[in-house]
Amino acid sequence: MDRFKLLITFLICAAFAYGCTAKQDFDRKGWNDGDGLDFPRRNLMIDDLLQKYQFKGMKYKNVVGLLHEPDRFSYDSTNFHYQIILKMQGLDTIRTKNLVFWWNKKDSVITDYKVTEKDYPKKEYKKK
């Protein structure tokens, strides 16, 4: 009986761990689940999103219709992005992952897109 309980406990833990890291099908509502700073389902959906949709050649308004308003535009407005991951340590950014779109502002057509990731070095603080 103890082995049975151990096996059940193991299976529950394994299912929970798999569920936390499993990929999910893209859905518009789930894409925007979050508090505006953290979107926990986007990283699980990004692969499915990119497999289902060919964004190159799509109009900006169609992208916004699918993904809602972008999280950020570049300073020169040649690209815009959706935040997938933003990890912070205090006030310091330690990791980012974004879905970036480049567009021709003249006719609002997406010319390219890609997922970008960056890990930032940890800052060392000297004690005085």
Image (cartoon, grey):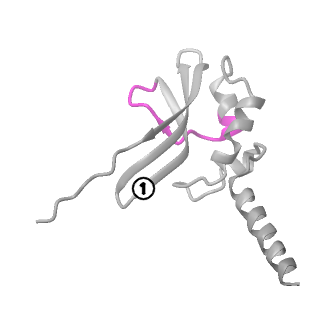
Q: Does residue 4 lie above or below 69 as drawn? A: below
Across and down, in percent, residue 32 comes to 65, 50
- Residue 76, image x and y in percent? 40, 25
- Residue that appears at 62% across and 54% down: 40
**Residue drawn 25% across the image and 55% down it:** 124
- Among all residues in the image, which is located at the extreme left? 128
* Residue 65 falls in image quadrant: top right
Is 69 in front, or is 11? 11
Residue occupied by mark 1:
88
Residue 127 image position (x, y, % from top left): 15, 65
Q: Nearer the viewer, residue 106 or 24?
A: 24
Viewed as shown, does residue 123 lie left or right of 116? left
Left or right: where does residue 49 sit relative to residue 35? right
Q: In the image, residue 91 lies at what x, y percent?
A: 34, 58
Taking 72 as reference, is 125 left or right? left
| Local SS, label 1 | strand
Q: Is residue 38 above or below residue 66?
A: below
- Considering the image in quadrants, where does the N terminus appear? bottom right
Left-right relation of 10 to 118: right
Q: Characterize the local packing of mark 1: few (<14), some (14-19) or many (20 or more) Cα atoms within 10 angstroms.
A: few
Query: What residue do we see at 47% from left, 44% from top?
Result: 96
Could you tell me the amino acid type at mark 1? Met
How many callouts does the rendering have?
1
Q: Magenta part of the protein: which range?
A: 64-77
Answer whether residue 73 is magenta in the image. yes
Q: Is residue 59 magenta?
A: no
Please identify the quadrant where the C terminus is shown.
Answer: bottom left
